[in-house]
Every structure is written in C-alpha cells, then in structure tokens.
Amino acid sequence: MPEKVTISVIKADVGGWVGHSSVHPALIEKARENLRERGSGLLIDSYVATVGDDINLIMTHRTGVDSPAVHELAWDTFVACTAVAKELKLYGAGQDLLSDAFSGNVRGMGPGVAEMEFVERQGEPVVVFMADKTEPGAWNLPLYRMFADPFTTIGLIIDPKMHTGFRFEVVDLIRHKKVMFSCPEELYDLLVFIGAPGRYCVKSVYSKALGEICATSTTERLNLTAGRYVGKDDPALIVRCQSGMPAVGEALEAFANPHLVAGWMRGSNHGPLMPVSAKDATPTRFDGPPRVVALGFTLCNGRLLGPQDLFADKSFDKARQIANDVAHYIRGLGPFEPGRLPLDEMEYTTLPDVMKRLSDRFEDVD
C-alpha cells in the first residue's frame, strides 16, 4: 500500500505591517527558521506564504490530519512570530492566538486549519488559495464554480472521471453541524445553503468517481470562537487538480469574475474578492479590497516543487479592473447596506453597545 502524504495549511494573523496591510520580513524569516529547525524530522517540506497581514504555513508530512506534533509546531511558530511582532510594535500582535498555551490541537484556538491526506498520484498539482480581509464563506461560490459549474469547468462535461460529479461537505457555523450533498443531483439543495456564506461554508469536496478528497478549506470563525470581534478569518483553501479533478486553469477560472464577500474594513463591509499576485497582496484602500492569492505546487514524494504565483498572469488584469470598479462603486454607499454588512452580521462590533444605550428610547408603534 503506497504511503499517504498530508498537506497542512495553518494560518494566523500575529501582527500587521503597516496597520493591516502586510507581514514584516522579520516575521517571515522567524517562521521559516522555526519550521526549518523545529520541523526537522517531522516535516517533509514547508513553505511560508503571506497574504495581507496573514502568515500561512504550508507543510507536508506523514503524520496525518490533526497531528498534535504538526499543530504544536505551527502554534509554537506563531508564538515565536508574535514575540517578534511585539518587539517591533506591529499592529495587532498575536491577535489570532486566543489561548496562552497549546492544548493538543490549534482548532478553536484562533488559527485557521486546512488539511488533507492522500496517496500521491503520478502527477499531483496542488493549488493553495489564500485570502485576506474576508471570511470562510468566500470560498463557497468559487468551489461551486470549480466542482459543479460546467460553464467554469468544462471537465464536468467531457472528462469521464468528472462527469458523475462531486460530493460537497457543508458546515453550519452556528449550529456546529455538517451535511453532505451529492452533485449534480442535489445541486439545488446545495445552493439553498451555500448561498448564505455567513453561516454555511463548504468545508471539503470529494470525487465520486475516484473516492478521493479534492479540496478542503479553513472554516474557523474568529468572532464565534472569541465571543468578540477580533478580525476577519482570512481563510485558506487547498485544491488538488488534474486527472479527474479540475484542471489548474479551471480552478483559477472560478475567480475570473470577482464576487462580493463579507469583510474589508473592520470586517463589516462587502467588497469584491480581487485575484492578485503575491507581491500585490497588500490591501490598503479602506484596508482592502479583499484579496486572494493562488500558489501552485507540484508534490513529489511530499516535496513542494514551487510555488508558481498563478494570479500573476496578465490574463487576470480584467478581473482586477472589475474588482477595482466594483470596489469604487460600493465604497460610495458608505455605512449603508449592502455596502455595510446587515446588522445580524455586526453583533460583535459596536451594535450591541448602541442598542443597549438606546434601549429605553424605543417605543411601541401605535
């Protein structure tokens, strides 16, 4: 039986430079150093990536999903980076670390986690998507486009291994429950839920023909974990490509027409998700608009060959222009919905305080 490999993407915001726009080089170097020294003998390979003010630790190993050793390594790396961030007086130092001590698994402790385990195919292209200034539901529409929309993924029509469809695991972030939808036959039922990305998120996607996991995402909601607003969740997504799964170009095509996502300034506004190169993942206008970066790797016996900066392609210039036009328009709405999020999405901002202060001024309507 061939040995399985695990790819883990664990991310956190432990300090922004300047404000919320990027990660200081000293933090990147500290993360690389920690993974290199403390991950020796545990990790096969690793890569430290950033998007906006978030650090994404991309790691491969043989210890499976939810490995305590890998999670502890990630936690210790973020703690070490937090110490550097505090020395440099970076903004929000350690904001995603909601605990003082590691407890065996980083889930529920602040960092976002996306992991999958599989046997490497003859060719194993993997794309790691990383977003900033938005929440996990931002992946709902792109994942639908990749794995259920033939106008995006022509392989659903012409590839026999894809024609039978995919299974979508959807998580209810409020009730902490999950449900599986088999597509295309349950496509309309799926859309009922994932069209509400603030509550329902696609966690993973599985191939029905191959019986394998194809994609998985971070679904942690910081405000629901901490009980207060501590920043948007800035999710990550891992997508395997080719040979019965979407081609790399099909996976990227899902971001060619920017869609509106929740987040942006103070996590309280709607904005277009702009596909950008790694060097342009430094959101500054109104702390945005929200960004997504795509790093492509080929796995070779667990080694990460890459990355290729996939959204650096000039063919995404039009998508960026559309995103800028939409951003300019929606900013004109200021604090009015739908520019601002609806009130039920703002319960961890100033809304409760304002409602409490004005409660005795509300009167019955005649």
Image (cartoon, rainbow, N blue to C red):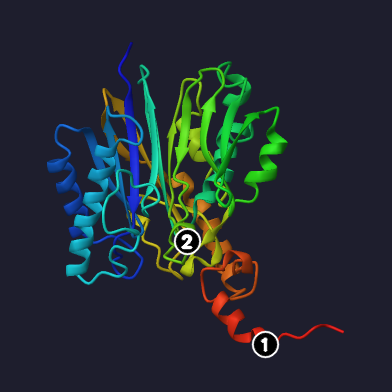
| Residue 211 point in image, percent of width and height | 51, 19
| Residue 251 point in image, percent of width and height | 50, 36
Q: Nearer the viewer, residue 291 or 357?
A: 357
Q: Amino acid at mark 1?
A: Asp
Mark 2 nearby-residue class (10 Å; few <14, some 14–19, many ≥20): some
Residue 56 visible to an observer of this rendering: yes
Task: Check the image and name the residue furthest to the top.
Answer: 1
Residue 166, picture quadrant:
top right
| Residue 326 point in image, percent of width and height | 58, 62
| Residue at the image position 38 percent from the left and 36 percent from the top | 115
Quadrant (top left/top right/bottom left/bottom right) for the C terminus: bottom right
Task: Check the image and name the residue furthest to the right.
Answer: 366
Residue bearing the label numbered 1: 360
| Above or below 318: residue 70 | above
Q: Nearer the viewer, residue 243 or 336?
A: 336
Left or right: 30 in relation to 229: left
Residue bearing the label numbered 2: 223
Quadrant (top left/top right/bottom left/bottom right) for the N terminus: top left
Task: Check the image and name the residue furthest to the left.
Answer: 37
